[in-house]
Amino acid sequence: MNTILITGCSSGFGLETARYFLDRDWTVIATMRTPNPDLLPPSDYLRILPLDVTDTASIARVVEAAGPIDVLVNNAGVGLLNAVEGISLDQAREVFETNTLGTIAMTRAFLPQFRERRAGVIVNVTSTVTLRPLHLLSVYTASKAAVNAFTESMALELEPFGVRARLVLPGLAPATAFGANARARMGMSIPEAYADVAAQVFAGLENPGDVTHPTDVAEAVWRAATDPSCPMRLPAGADAVAWAKAG
């Protein structure tokens, strides 16, 4: 039986991906900062572990507790929507510590077992905001674009060992709690000089048109995990697919 470890399973994409793989009889190790066993149905195939991807000791404990796995999904992340002038360096560091360095740290922690077994898949969940410049998302986009570049370069290193690395790029997902969590965690003190720009951005978010659903991301992760012929970048969601086609 295959085993998948997914970070950021307390809500949204990670939670839905955990459900998706459980429904297909995989062993799922769902990690969260604060484990909540009520989020997923009881199953002999499910383990829930605490994890903070910015804490090396926490990562080491998860590696030891998880044992051998077949697929690592780096999904944990934090958001930040603000003009550059409204972002402190501490906020920027926190975004990069989680989104970028957390992904790198988790990957480094599990790579030795993949390389030694000459098998394994790493799926990094980033965002379609990396496909075009958008207002108020400079730091967040940079943190995700870095993961894109990291993953694509790393894939070349790992190919001789039979280890795959792939990217899943979701679009806008209003059904998830990601935006609310980001605002609560990072603050939303947009400078007055950018008020007009912010108003336009928020108006667009109220009528987004096509969007991404958590199931779209779960399906893309499934393909990345199980289909060796899938492309490096997998857009997830109707809006994500349209953006990718538009180039």
Image (cartoon, rainbow, N blue to C red):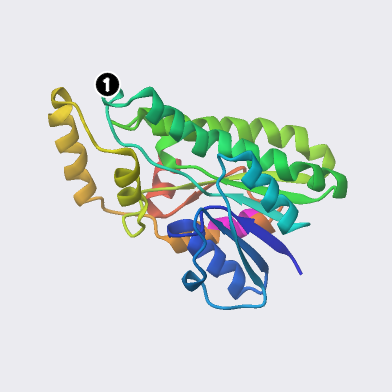
Residue type, numbered disc 1: Glu
Q: Position of residue 77 (x, y in %)?
A: 47, 44
Q: Which residue is mark 1?
A: 85
- Report the magenta residues as a range: 220-224
| Res 131 → quadrant | top left
Q: Position of residue 29 (x, y in %)?
A: 64, 62
Name the residue located 33 percent from the left edge and 39 percent from the top edge: 186
Tell me: 181 left or right of 61.
left
Above or below — where is 137 with respect to 205?
Answer: above
| Res 127 → quadrant | top left
Residue 223 is one of the magenta-drawn residues:
yes
Q: How many marks?
A: 1
Tell me: 42 left or right of 171.
right
Tell me: 201 left or right of 142.
left
Residue 247 seen in this snapshot: no
Residue 143 seen in this snapshot: yes
Name the element at disc 1.
helix
Pick the quarter of the image with the C terminus.
top left
Please state which of residues 10 and 125 is positioned toward the viewer in this rendering. Answer: 10
Name the residue located 31 percent from the left edge and 26 percent from the top edge: 87
Name the residue located 38 percent from the left edge and 41 percent from the top edge: 79
Above or below — where is 83 with respect to 234?
Answer: above
Name the residue located 57 percent from the left edge and 39 percent from the top edge: 102
Pick the quarter of the image with the N terminus.
bottom right
Tell me: 179 left or right of 214.
left
Sort mark 1 into few (<14), some (14-19) or many (20+) by Cα contacts within 10 Å. few
Please state which of residues 154 and 96 is positioned toward the viewer in this rendering. Answer: 96
Above or below — where is 34 with respect to 130?
Answer: below
Please state which of residues 119 and 245 is positioned toward the viewer in this rendering. Answer: 119
Q: Position of residue 210 (x, y in %)?
A: 31, 54
Q: Position of residue 11 (x, y in %)?
A: 43, 60
Q: Main secondary structure of the magenta part?
A: helix
